[in-house]
Amino acid sequence: MPKQIITVFGATGKQGGSVVASILNSPAASTKFSVRAITRDVTKDSAKALASKGAEVVAADLSDKESLRKAIKGAYGVFGVTDFWSDLSAEREITQGKNIADICKEENVQHLVWSSLLDVTKLTNGVLSEVRHFDSKATVEEYIRELGVPATFFLPGFYMANIPGMNLRADPEGKWSLALPMPDDAPIPLFAAEHDTGKFVKAIFLKREDTLGKRVYGATAYTTPLQILDAFKKVYPVSGKEAQFHRLPNDMFKGILGSMGMPDFAQEELLQNMRLIYEYGYYGGEKLEWSTSLVDEPLTTWEEYIKGNSALAGAQ
């Protein structure tokens, strides 16, 4: 029996790359599915690496429906993901997501897994109305539901990769600290996107009937800033001996982002993203147990993630 094709968008990125690797490396998934890895440039080394591992590598542009048709035609399943941060355009992201949905509908795709997030404006009744990279993906999720495409919605958590070297770093004197604009008991749904996206998405494809129409929350565990710091102290006892947590004032947080060249609207967006975590809950207070129970292999813990992490090279 021929394998069912899974089209994976963003195949050279953190999320898509993890999906490709998980399917190809899994006996259960690789005997059932083949992978069509989608990237904008098939000549890149990262694209060639995917081909060498057994993926069919195809070029496509999310803004070009006909190229999307070539990418999706004949596929049983599709993993769809868009990148707001490439040009900070929610409108572009919504259009691209709807393009994927339209072609999935036209080509009779049996299972679309959409990388989504909550509509923060609706969740907070407009209090936090600037978190565009959440709201845009939620808009596409709503469109997919209205269109009637058989779909599951995967909501990635707070990237672990964003912490080492950025929020967790040493000052010029060598003293380490974790600095975030939130209280020390805020529940952060930590997620190792490059390692664990595929674990969740593979499980979703293999458990279609259990997951259709549902949201799957992609995170290992809710972890507070103090727990993040405690793990750092355990893994790096010398550097962690005097390490402290600092709650950044909101204006200081935005100022740091501004000093990195980030425009005002994006500074406010990321601040509201942080406020979401402790004011309303990143997932609106939803629990993680059902989502993590779908995965049949260990998820990456924060402690595991920071061991030997290159961004923490100076820690000991």
Image (cartoon, rainbow, N blue to C red):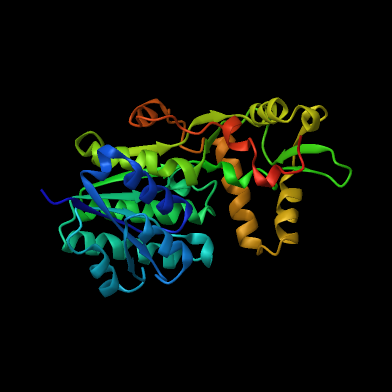
Image quarter where the C terminus lies is: top right
Q: Quadrant of the rendered structure where residue 175 is? A: top right
Q: Residue furthest left?
A: 1
Q: How many marks?
A: 0
x and y percent of residue 288 in the render? 42, 29
> Can residue 44 be seen in this snapshot?
yes
Which is nearer the eye, 45 or 209?
45
Instruction: Name above or below for residue 10 compared with residue 3.
Output: below
Locate residue 224 relative to residue 236 in the image: left or right.
Answer: left
Identified at 22% across, 43% down, the residue is 31
Locate residue 6 relative to residue 282 in the image: left or right.
Answer: left
Identified at 26% across, 45% down, the residue is 30
Instruction: Name above or below for residue 299 compared with residue 9.
Output: above
Instruction: Name above or below for residue 209 compared with residue 8.
Output: above
x and y percent of residue 296 in the render? 34, 29
> Can residue 125 be seen in this snapshot?
no
Q: Quadrant of the rendered structure where residue 91 is? A: bottom left
x and y percent of residue 229 in the render? 69, 30
x and y percent of residue 145 in the render? 25, 50
Identified at 42% across, 72% down, the residue is 43
Q: Residue furthest right?
A: 173
Which is nearer the eye, 254 or 243?
243
